[in-house]
Amino acid sequence: MIKNKIILTLIICSLLSPLFVVKASTELTNEQNIKQGSIEIRTMILNKKIDERKNEKKTVLNTKSKDAIFPILTKIYKNLDEKVKKMEAIDSEISARMAELKKEGKDTTVTEAQYNIAKLELDKAQASVIVASTLSVKQILSSTSQGVIRDLVKETENSIKNAGNSYKKMIPLFIQLEAK
């Protein structure tokens, strides 16, 4: 019951409140106008100085983050490049082994088909490392978000994994060839 009375009172007050508004004098004296204008000018100047300082801090932070990211990305792409080089070494061993099996007179058509797929995946991985490292540097210089750079690295890692998986698929084919 009391809640209803309170709610009813609040509703009536809110409906009648516009009727009881006291009209304030909006006219200012010349002296008050000058003070108001100088306060507004000071506020604008202070806001401008604050914005300039924020921009200076942002540029300092951007250069610091760029300086921190470059060595990390260099290390990441160096590791990815080393993985590709290891796969190139594996590729040369596989091609040598396939040449030996051909000399022995074994049918290597299925293995060669898988080898060609793996070689194509390796070429994609090599290109991906080169392109991604170049694009990452450009993205850092243009202050792009970390998400874009992270996506480039993940995409490159995935292409290297795909190449590795293609070479792994050759293992049972070689086992079958040697068994014949």
Image: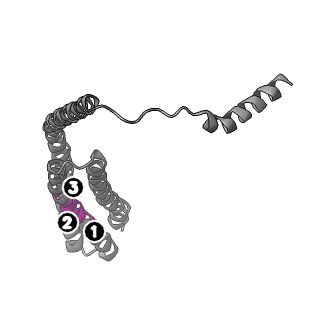
Q: Marks 3 and 2: in contact by CB < 8 Å?
A: no
Tally of numbered tags: 3
Q: Label 2: how many residues lie within 10 Å, few (<14), some (14-19) or many (20+)?
A: some
Q: Position of residue 149 (x, y in %)?
A: 25, 49
Image point 20% across, 35% down: which residue?
Answer: 41
Q: Does 128 sit above or below residue 33? A: below
Image point 81% across, 27% down: which residue?
Answer: 5
Q: Marks 1 and 2: in contact by CB < 8 Å?
A: yes
Residue that mark 1 sits on: 115
Query: In what quadrant of the picture does the C terminus appear?
Result: bottom left
At label 3, the amino acid type is Met
- Please tell me which residue lies in front, 165 or 115: 165
Q: Which residues are magenta?
A: 121-130
- Please tell me which residue lies in front, 143 or 157: 143
Say which label, 2 or 3, has the lower sequence index.
3
Find the distance from the CA under tag 1 to the CA under tag 3. 12 Å
Say which label, 2 or 1, has the lower sequence index.
2
Q: Position of residue 137 (x, y in %)?
A: 15, 50
Residue that mark 2 sits on: 95
Residue that mark 3 sits on: 87
Query: In what quadrant of the picture does the N terminus appear?
Result: top right
Is residue 180 at least partly visible in the picture? yes
Say which label, 1 or 3, has the lower sequence index.
3
- Please tell me which residue lies in front, 84 or 145: 145
